[in-house]
Amino acid sequence: ILGAGFPLDALLALAVRHAAHVSEVADVAIDLFDDHIRKAVGPNATQEQAAGRLADQEIVAQAFRALLPQVTRLVARTT
């Protein structure tokens, strides 16, 4: 890129902006996963449902493994 004549300072500034936005999006994505998968099944969930969901960490791991490839494909198509 530098060989094509792009100035280093402009590339670095762009990289910093990109990193900040990626970090912000990642934080929101983590919150979404946390709210909809790791935490209780919903505001109307019984205490038994919520306790079972939180107690079984394997559910969280399975959901992560299932969703990661789907999210990766989604991001790859929109960028």
Image: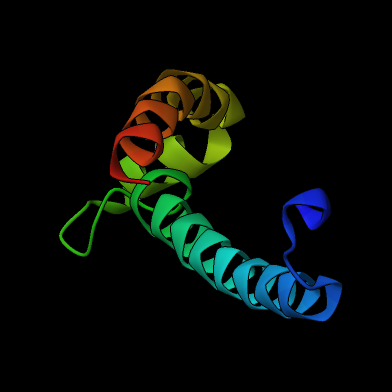
What is the x, y in percent for residue 65?
A: 51, 20
In the image, 67 versus 7, the foreground residue is 7
Residue, x 51% and y 32% (percent of image)?
60
Residue most extreme to the left: 44
Q: Quadrant of residue 53 in the image?
A: top left
Q: Relative to the observer, which residue lies in front, 20 or 17? A: 17
Residue 72's image quarter? top left
Instruction: State left or right for residue 70 relative to residue 64.
Output: left
| Along the line of sight, the residue nearer the viewer: 78 or 53 | 78
> Residue at position x 84%, y 71% from top?
8
Number of on-image labels: 0
Asked whether 5 or 31 is in front, the reply is 5
- Residue 17 sits in which quadrant? bottom right
On screen, residue 41 above or below 72: below
Up the image or down, 59 lies above or below 79; here it is above
- Left or right: where does residue 2 sit relative to residue 23? right
Q: Is residue 59 above or below residue 31?
A: above
Residue 47 at x, y = what percent? Answer: 32, 53
The percent position of residue 55, horizontal first and vertical second, equals 55, 37
Question: Percent x, y for residue 56?
Answer: 54, 29
Colour basis:
rainbow
Q: Residue at x 39, y 58 (%)?
A: 32
Residue at position x 24%, y 56% in the image: 42
